[in-house]
Image: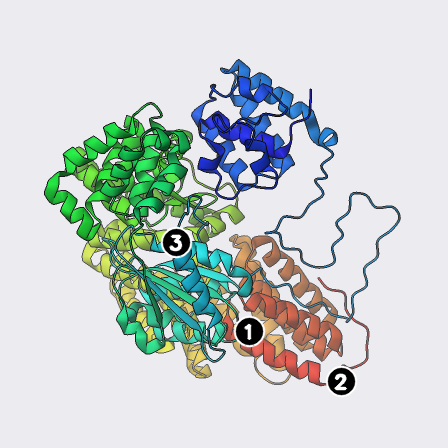
Amino acid sequence: MDAITPAELTVFLIRALGSSPAAVVGAPGPGLDDAVAGDESTGVPAGPPGHLARIAAESAPAHAVARAWRAAVASPGDLVAHRVLAEELLAEAAACPGLRDALADAIGGGAAQTGVSVNEIGGSARVYGPTVQARSVSGGIHFHAAGDAPEPQRAPPPRQLLPAPAHFTGREGDLAVLDRMLSAKSDRAHLLVVITGPAGVGKTALATRWLHSVQKDFPDGQMYADLRGHADTGPAAPGEVLGPFLRALGAASVPAEPVEQAALWRSVTAGLRVAVMLDNALTAAQVRPLLPGGADSLVVVTGRRRLTGLSTEGAEFHPLGLLDAQTGVDLLRHGIGHRRVADEPQASREVVALCAGLPLAVCLIAARLAARPRQRVRALADALARDAGPQAVLNLVVEGEMAVRNALDASYAVLGPEAARLYRRLGLLPVRTFDADTAAVAAEEEPDRAETLLDELIEANLVEEVGSDSCRLHDLVRAHAAERAAAAEAARTRNDTVQRVVEWYLWAATEAEKRLTPQQFTLDRTYLQGPPGPPAPFLSDTGAIAWLDRQRLNLMAVIHHAADRGWDDLCWQLVDAAWPLFLRLRHYDLWIEAHGVGLAAARRAGHPAAVRQMLNSGAIGLSAAGRTGEAVTWYEASARAAREAGDFRDEGQALLGLGACSREAGRLEEAAIFLHRAIEVWEGCGYARGGALARIVLGELALAEPGPAGPRRAVELFTHARDTMAAVPDPHDAARAQAFLGRARVRAGDYALGAAQLTEALAAFDASGAAYWQARTLEMLAESVAEHGEGAASRDYYERALALYGSTSPDDAVRVRDRLEGLRSSTPPAGPVAPGP
């Protein structure tokens, strides 16, 4: 038989779903139009292979076909991708002999028979450094790079835009207007475009489609943020947006104050060409702090209100109207196929009219009809008109609200009972995004089953995929799901659902804390419904820190929600469990915000030990963020409370913190007094680790002294601290003491041993992923080799430290950049270059 082509296999996969290719493929790949041209009535190509017609009426399991269909549409010309999809579909379609046989024939064609070369780099790929793309290579390949120190690799620019809508249609006039705005953009200012219109009119879809079309003009990044202008939880604060934006551009550590965040955002973007989409804005004041610096950026704001206050920022306004009747019918045709619309043109026009020109409503109605291929369009049109009534139809025309509710009701009505229950409960969640684990907890299902139910909701256009393992509900859909929950679920059930999800986050964060900071003193956890069922969503230390980082905004959301619900013990325990997130990744803004909420909750709960825990942990964050005065206030309050309670561990922690703050303020004698008192208190109650922590800070004081006496005393202090931490065991703090010990030995005159100890500490931090301490150790190595006369090696260490500080500590990055510039401008001293660690 003839080999199947990529285009034909795409058509085959689409036909397996039961839709015409034109209805589901927004932008066919090369050859697809020709492949489907053979038979307009069925969409099956007239030419070989003729076996496709044999299986046109058959269907595979819905979830397998859906996955194959989505991926085929995403890459219609990729033969390798199609072979993999076909193999997967074949494995899962045992109940469909015709489909299995046809797929076996299709797979048998192979790349060799088609003559297609698959040595290809996709359009979205990024290649860093010297690269060879070749089918085969004979002989050797040699790369020659100029310079004796490579530039540190930068992370790829962020690509945060939502996926371009698959069924986008019409709006050519709107797209042309936006293109003209960009063409007329001044070189002296960024372009601010404000797209406004009623709910469901397609503002987000239009902005997303246009930004994808111009993304090549903004190579430094495309940013996206949902400002939640009409969400029940309230609009997003500037810090919720600026923190993720700054971290995406490399500044993982951001200031705690919103004004400082906005200033840093303008500084970071001043020389960049970035496109920023601010979705669902409520007011002009919400948008202003998020505008980037410089003249080369593009900002697109969408909102239901007119946002005329942005005219003072030079905004260009584009009100978005409803779809006209023909465009609405075209959109419906994309969803349900040409034949059904052609068979019932009047009913199709009535359905579109009842949707009031709202693309969201049309898409949801199309999804409902596609799920019922035997239902007549007339039946749905009559049902919508009957249920709505004259007054509801009037409201639909004016406000565009009832069409969405009716469409959502119709989509909800055809869900299976388990998917419907999950849909209702997702509408109750306090988090903005969710994965299969969260859905499983909400629905009281196993994760695998929850993932299947999520697939059903995604196919019904009720849930959006916003990442490889992350989903969300549109604001209107979330409100509808919550309404359905209020109607179908008892108040106790709704309360238990939310509480169960909050406790799941507490349990998972606590499991991460046990892995990452096992030596950290933690208070007991209290679960009102018992520990959650699913296993922890990570299997390693690196997986645990990655999960905490990925879920940081959801953790903040459940912390606030627990406080709002009066679940005070859950609230402060969530803050306590997130300690590794704050300690390792140093998101200072979130650190301080969370501990402010947690401290208030602990006080309301009447839990003195929790109050002291919040004071001490929060003070560490305040001090690290440079807010030393506030940190001292928190430490002093903790010290007083600890003395009153006779808690020597907490008192020692407060004294250590006061010593560190005094050192930062330059009051070195006062710092030493606090630190010696901390050692006395801690060792008096047998807490050796605490004494070691205080000795590390004392060692830093000694190391800063001029002359040889201070470094020699520092060697003794750091040695004692390292050995104590190793015995606890506390690998992270043992590595910190080892790094300082290596630096002290170099200062004391033993360069070889000191450099070796620094290198050993660096390896420990590399293994644990502690980026900030990798940078600190590299900086100490740079200082040490420079003092030993090895300028080239010093520059290399500084460059590596700078690359890490850029994503962990902007203040340290500025200091290291200044030192590096000083080295580059001076003549490097002669001498051998030390090998890197």
In primary-sequence order, the first of circles 3 and 2 is 3
Query: On the picture, is 45 further left or further right than 160?
Result: right
Q: Which numbered circle lies on residue 397?
A: none
Q: Which residue is mark 2?
A: 827
Q: Where is residue 792, by image quadrant?
A: bottom right
**Residue flagged by tag 3: what amino acid is it?**
Arg
**Looking at this view, is 73 or 22 the one in front?**
22
Distance of mark 2 from mark 1, alpha carbons? 23 Å
In primary-sequence order, the first of circles 2 and 1 is 1
Q: Which residue is mark 3?
A: 171
Which residue is at 53% across, 71% downward?
272
Residue 323, image x, y percentages: 31, 50
Q: Which residue is mark 1?
A: 813
**Residue flagged by tag 1: what amino acid is it?**
Ala
Q: Vertically, is 164 above or below 157?
A: above
Residue 758, image x, y percentages: 65, 65
**Looking at this view, is 270 or 149 the one in front?**
270
**Looking at this view, is 502 or 117 the one in front?**
117
